[in-house]
Image (cartoon, helix red, strand yellow):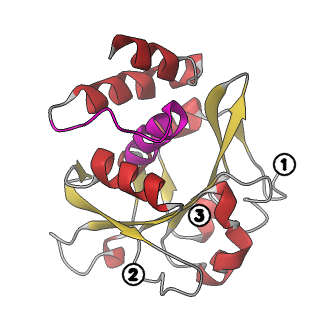
Amino acid sequence: MMGGLMRAARFVSKSGAAFLLAALIVFSLPGHTQEVPSAEYRIKAAFLYHFCNYIDWPPSAFKSDDSPLLIGIAAPQEIVNQMRQSIEGRTARGRPVVIRAIQPGDSLETLHVIYITEPMNARRFGITALSPRPILVVTEDDDGFAAGSVINFVIEDDRVRFDIAPHAARERNLHVGAQLLTAARNIRGNNGR
């Protein structure tokens, strides 16, 4: 197990050290098996979960005080299963987290987070049309910000990093915590640069 954690650790940057610590805790808990798609997606699962704890949604985004935080994952089934195993059943912002597999054409309005993996192509989901709904959109696509993403994963020097567009979060009525901004590789301006 230690060798796998060491390989996963090299994907994370120094500025993401707090997220790495959280990832190590998440994946050392009982009930988490060693069958995972890759170290990259183990780290992305930890990041995705922690993004939920550093974003504030307006109260109107939830049906009630005990409504779950719904995360839609557009990815190959193996990755969706890993996200379920890693995240579902945990709580974020005091709400239970529920994972749903999504495909282009699905209704996305009730989701709080949408994660679109690179092979799924963010533009196919029409996420720009969802603005100003309070939905955190996370991609791993070179075109992610142009497609309406708030956070975009990148691999830099064999490490999982992320860029963030605070203006896109504001357009979606989301507030990004300062700790999340500090951990980002780049903070994108209104033009996506």
Foreground of the two, 189 or 105: 105
Q: Which mark is residue 170?
A: 3
Identify which residue is drawn at 20% across, 59% down: 96
Q: Please state which of the two labelled residues, at mark 2 or mark 1, is closer to the viewer.
A: 2
Q: Earlier in the sequence, mark 3 or mark 2?
A: 2
Magenta part mainly helix, strand or loop?
A: helix
On the image, numbered disc 1 is attached to which residue? 193
Horizontal side of residue 128 vs 72, given as left or right: right
Q: Nearer the viewer, mark 3 or mark 2?
A: 2
Percent across and percent down for residue 56 are: 40, 57
* Place of residue 116 in the rendered image (x, y in percent of width and height, measured from the top left): 58, 62
Q: Quadrant of residue 104?
A: bottom right
- Magenta-tinted stretch: 31-50
Q: CA distance from mark 3 to mark 2?
A: 18 Å
Mark 2 closeness class: few <14, some 14–19, many ≥20 residues within 10 Å: some
Q: Using the numbered discs, state the Cα–Cα distance from disc 3 to disc 1 in whole angstroms.
A: 17 Å
Q: Amino acid at mark 2?
A: Thr
Q: Which mark is residue 110?
A: 2
